[in-house]
Amino acid sequence: MNTEKKLNMTMLCDFYELTMGNGYYQAGLNDEITYFDVFFRSVPDKGGFAICAGLGQLIEYIQNLHFDEEDIAYLRGRGLFSEDFLSYLKEFRFTGDIWAIPEGTPIFPQEPVVTVRAPAIQAQLIETFTLLAINHQSLIATKANRIVRAAEGRTVLEFGSRRAQGTDGAITGARAAYIGGCAGTACTISDQLFGVPAGGTMAHAWVQMFDTQYEAFKTYCELYPNNATLLVDTYNTLKSGVPDAIRAFDEVLKPRGIKKCGIRLDSGDIAYLTRKARKMLDDAGWTECRISASNSLDEYIIRDLLLQGAKVDLFGVGERMITASSQPVFGGVYKLVAVEDAEGRVCPKIKISENVDKITNPHYKRVYRIFDKATGKAEADYITVWDERVDEERSLELFDPRATWKRKTFTDFKVRELQTPVFRNGELVYQQPDLKEIQAYCLEQVDTLWDEVKRFENPHTYYVDLSQKLWDIKQTLLRESE
């Protein structure tokens, strides 16, 4: 295989999507219009909400769907697919509709994040990549947002490329971390491809390459006077690391009138060392020198460090963010929820399970977010059948998800439909914001959530409810299945 050739992501599918596609074609169902929802069942780390991400890569994938001659040859060689189906794949393109919740939006379990309306083969074929894009980046954006919130306004950078699960885990993971609130990344290619600001200074190897630590620091300051952040823990942080950094700053930066500089610690007792380092820097007149910390950090460690009085201005977070190691699976699923009959009527479909959480919400749906007019805070999400509209002039009652016998009534509220059209008849109709705009939007939308929902432990359960019409349809389908 020529590894330099760009992979055709159309073939990044589960094999059953192809065998089902061939079956649909042979059974005359290839033009049957279907509706599929992407949704998830639980928030990672038992949090109160997740952050939607990955739509940008889904859009790129849909726009490039095609089968190359070598793809067709490979499939023919499997001996499973009819020539009529293979001829169909030669002309394959996506002609359906897609709606999605914009990237950066807080999302909650059981609500449609992406909805696909397309002929059966097309809708089935895109299942794997759709889930891959949304699951991975939503997972990392959610974890990054938790870490950024734990830092309480201090800068957080994504440092995890070398510990990511594969190249795409590093590259799009950095993109997702930026959406979640990180200020930048160590991953150069993510800056080149997506504009995630990349930066970095030195590793311990730089210090070890010189005869003395001071010489290493002085040389670096001379080469990069406007970006001098020195790694001070190669040998002894307080006895030589910080003193040598101060000496280099004094001899190289001070004569040039440069006050912007920094030190970084990557080991040891960060809380203790940064308190001591801060005093040493301040006593030497380097009050504007920033202190950075890294080394297997996550939201809980960062929170504890700050509670212990750590003097950290910037956190570099690696493996525990880029892999979301505390819960490294998002768990989004892709389920059939409706088909259209010959007259164009939408016929709801349901998947039933003894596990109540795995019973799907049927039908082509809309998702509304309810905001309190007085506070501007998000109060609930409301899922309806596609032909329902929420009237802001009438009161609205929703079930309390913690106790289904309770209802909450909303009176003075406004609503916003969450999903937006992305593709219509196979054509892109969505104006994609740039990444910086997505990050700003994410910050703004997270701010609409109550602090109780944003707690790390035992967060308040956010209301997500079905309209009465949708509830009745679901109950009817459940009864009919008995």
Image (spheres, rainbow, N blue to C red):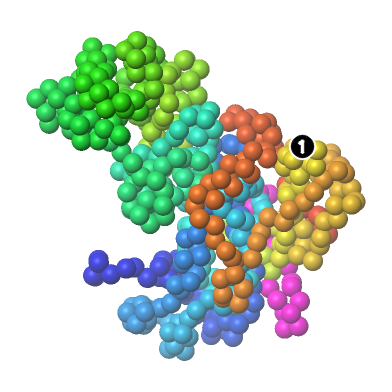
Q: Is residue 346 inside the magenta stretch? A: yes
Image point (31%, 38%), residue name: 200
Q: Position of residue 444 (x, y in %)?
A: 62, 42
Q: Position of residue 276 (x, y in %)?
A: 35, 12
Label 1 neighbourhood size at 10 Å, few (<14), some (14-19), many (20+)? Answer: few
Image point (76%, 76%), residue name: 345
Residue with the most extreme right position:
394
The quadrant of the rendering that contains the N terminus is bottom left
Q: Is residue 43 inside the magenta stretch? A: no
> Would you say 474 lies left or right of 307 here?
right
- Main secondary structure along the magenta-highlighted residues: loop
Mark 1: amino acid: Thr
Image point (30%, 43%), residue name: 162
Q: Position of residue 225 (x, y in %)?
A: 26, 32
Q: Is residue 429 above or below residue 29?
A: above
Magenta highlight range: 339-359
Q: In which image quadrant can residue 149 be found? A: top right
- The residue nearer to you, when weighing 194 against 84, is 194
Q: Which residue is mark 1?
A: 375
Q: In which image quadrant can residue 238 be found? A: top left
- As helix, strand or loop, the secondary structure at mark 1 comes to loop
The quadrant of the rendering that contains the C terminus is bottom right
Q: How many marks can you see?
A: 1
Q: Position of residue 337 (x, y in %)?
A: 67, 65
- The residue nearer to you, when weighing 26 against 396, is 396
Q: Is residue 389 visible?
A: yes
Q: Is residue 232 visible?
A: no
Residue with the most extreme left position:
211
Q: Is residue 187 above or below residue 2?
A: above
Image point (74%, 72%), residue name: 347
- The residue nearer to you, when weighing 434 against 221, is 221
